[in-house]
Amino acid sequence: MDKSKRLFLKSKRSFRRRLPPIQSGDRIDYRNMSLISRFISEQGKILSRRVNRLTLKQQRLITIAIKQARILSLLPFLNNEKEFEKSELVARTTGLRTRKK
């Protein structure tokens, strides 16, 4: 076989098919925190479809469920504990000053 024909042959590697992250029995709902938390980054951001390996319909449903959970205070809007600690310290030192007469 000459080189020109070899380039167009498929490689014989076997790819392991990844399991879908959401099985057919899972309900995408704002109350299903174990499912929703898999699709949020450490900072609290919604991960993209490519990262999640979801279909377009599943990604839309996950996004809606995450937003509903945030509105109902089941999830934080930001998951940045360092920022929260800094703002807490600033509020303690500047907000509670009293004037002496």
Image (spheres, rainbow, N blue to C red):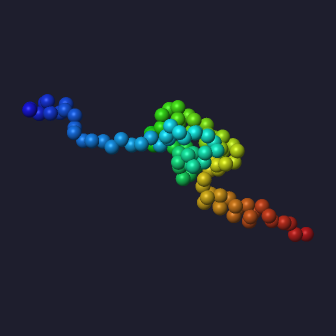
Determine the residue positioned at 80% across, 65% down: 97
Estimate the x, y position of residue 28 in percent, counting from the top left. 58, 39
Query: Is there any visible trace of residue 94 in the rendered image?
Result: yes
Estimate the x, y position of residue 92 in percent, counting from the top left. 74, 64
Task: Give the left or right position of residue 42, taking residue 75 as reference.
Answer: left
Determine the residue positioned at 48% across, 34% down: 55
Q: Quadrant of the N terminus?
A: top left
Residue extending farthest to the bottom is 100
Number of numbered callouts drawn: 0
Q: Quadrant of the C terminus?
A: bottom right
Q: Nearer the viewer, residue 89 or 63?
A: 63
Q: Nearer the viewer, residue 62 or 19?
A: 19
Residue extending farthest to the front is 25
Residue extending farthest to the left is 1
Query: Is there any visible trace of residue 52 in the rendered image?
Result: no
Indicate the quadrant where residue 64 lies.
top right
Determine the residue positioned at 57% across, 45% down: 36
Task: Give the left or right position of residue 68, taking residue 25 as reference.
Answer: right
Estimate the x, y position of residue 99 in percent, counting from the top left. 86, 66
Q: Nearer the viewer, residue 43 or 91?
A: 43
Say above or below: 92 vs 10. below
Estimate the x, y position of residue 22 in percent, counting from the top left. 50, 41
Say above or below: 67 vs 82. above
Determine the residue positioned at 60% across, 55% down: 80
